[in-house]
Image: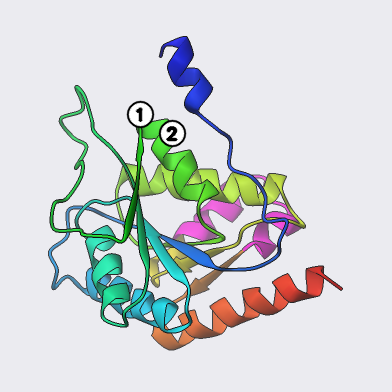
Amino acid sequence: MTRDEQKRIVIPKPNLLSRIDKIAFYGGADMAEDHPVCQAAYEAAAYVASQKKIVVNGGGPGVMGAATRGAQSKNGKTLAITFKPVDMPEFEGRDAENIVDQEIKTANYLERMFALMDNADLFVCFQGGTGTLSEWATAWLLAHLHYGNHKPLILYGHFWYEVMEVIHKHFLIGYKESKVYRIVDNLEEFKIALHIFEDEMRERLK
């Protein structure tokens, strides 16, 4: 990484405004449009857009494209954080069919990941691969580091119960790290979790 590239990487800021205006969607790129996970992302993004919030994603296919389409089904606003991969044959890159209102182009994978987090107030994590794993883990870490002005996470899918059970069993996870996320299994639970986090945000301002 060159010195110029290092200068462009900015660590995501905490949510000092205590508002949820932009929501980032993380999840697998290698999923067809009719995959249940993509359908769940579509429905969740449609609800987010109906609440006048901006849907943010990485500009790729799979869950990312589903999030964009879901937002557009409610005439919602969309934002993609992208980069053009070089010597990365396993990275999905920009999906030409994921057409968004605004695109922020970054220089590399790390800059893209941090820009996704800097341009969102809450993260929705669906099933995915190692890319999703890295995004979720980093977002969770930052929520812990910024606790009190943190950006919360919604972990979407029943499999997360098993994942978090294993993590809590084998890692040193504290109380505050457990308070920054909620696991949901369907759209109704997603709606409830989102509004709970919004209520918590309002409490910060009192």
The residue at 43%/77% (across/down) is 48
Task: Locate residue 38: give its quadrant.
Answer: bottom left
The residue at 57%/50% (across/down) is 140
Q: How many marks?
A: 2
Closest to the observer: 105 or 31? 105
Relative to residue 25, is residue 109 depicted above or below? above
Left or right position of 179 against 94: right
CB under 8 Å between callouts 2 and 1? yes
Q: Residues within 10 Å of mark 2 (few under 14, many from 20)?
A: many
Closest to the observer: 180 or 206? 206
Does the magenta run of residues contain 183? no
Task: Locate residue 76: give its quadrant.
Answer: bottom left
Q: Residue type at mark 1?
A: Ala
Left or right position of 50 against 90: right
Q: Which residue is mark 2?
A: 111
- Residue reaching furthest bottom? 188
Q: Which residue is mark 1?
A: 107
Task: Locate residue 130: give its quadrant.
Answer: top left
The residue at 27%/55% (across/down) is 28
Q: Which residues are magenta?
A: 163-180
Closest to the observer: 146 or 137? 146
Q: Residue type at mark 2?
A: Glu
Q: Residues within 10 Å of mark 1 (few under 14, many from 20)?
A: some
**Residue 36 position in % (x across, y down):** 22, 74
- Element type at mark 2: helix
- Residue reaching furthest right? 206
Quadrant of image for the N terminus = top left
